[in-house]
Amino acid sequence: MKIRVIHAITGVTATWLEREEKILRSYAKPDTHLEIVSIRQGAESIESYFDIHIGSLNTLRLVKEAEEKGFDGIIITCFGNANLDPAREIVSIPVVGSGQASMLLATGLGHRFSIIGTVRSAADRHRIEAMKLGISAKLASVRCIEARVLSLHDDLDATLMAMLEAGRKAIEEDGAQVLIPGCFGMVGLAEKMQQELGVPVVDPAGAAVKLIETLVDLKLSQSKLAFPIPPPKKRDF
């Protein structure tokens, strides 16, 4: 199967991309082809709704192009599921977001899960995404490490230590039984967190890859009753 992986940001460096590509491919089946692309116009990272919206047209063009080129499915890497809803409207092939995939998987692993996020201003966006999925009752907390997205890779050991501290608080103070790193820039750290903290930790990269592969294998996609194709009209797109 052919899957397009879309970064809805412009700030992905070559080193960052190389690391993420290895992680994504480690989760994919041998016959899954992953094409990783990034938008060319928009925000260098996503830390607000404004950042999401200024990159929306570029993101949606890459979504539409993927279907036209014969891809079987699409992953939007942003943990905030940037432009996921409109993307699911404009194509018939399945589209998943890494936050959506991670939270859905976490609900089956325990009664309460926590998200370990980046900046505190993003916390409400995570809560809103959980609300949209109908799983707010299972969201124990959003704990943020107060690190900017583009700084996460400056010192991965320091990032991991901050995530471990936040994870312990989520478990001990908030009652979390499952944890999710709440930014795609944190992928690859879940296994170390799980070993250290002793609870399931869902890697957003793995969750997104496995969900899209499952949907393609089962010949399932988003319902067009829920995400209808927009009616034809003149649009400057």
Image (tube, rainbow, N blue to C red):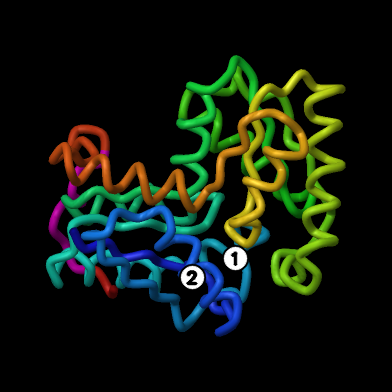
Q: Residues within 10 Å of mark 1 (few under 14, many from 20)?
A: some
> What secondary structure prevails in the magenta region?
loop
Circle on res. 178: none
State the image coordinates of residue 63 (x, y, percent, origin top left).
29, 65
The correct choice, above or below, for 197 with respect to 117 in the image is above
Nearer to me, 199 or 90: 199
11 inside magenta stretch? no
Residue under numbered circle 2? 55
Residue 235 is left or right of residue 82, and the answer is: left
Magenta extent: 227-234
Residue under numbered circle 1? 51
Q: Residue at x 84, y 54 (%)?
A: 146
Q: Residue at x 23, y 66 (%)?
A: 64
Q: Residue at x 42, y 48 (%)?
A: 208
Residue 180 is left or right of residue 158, and the answer is: left
Q: Which quadrant, please, contains the C terminus? A: bottom left
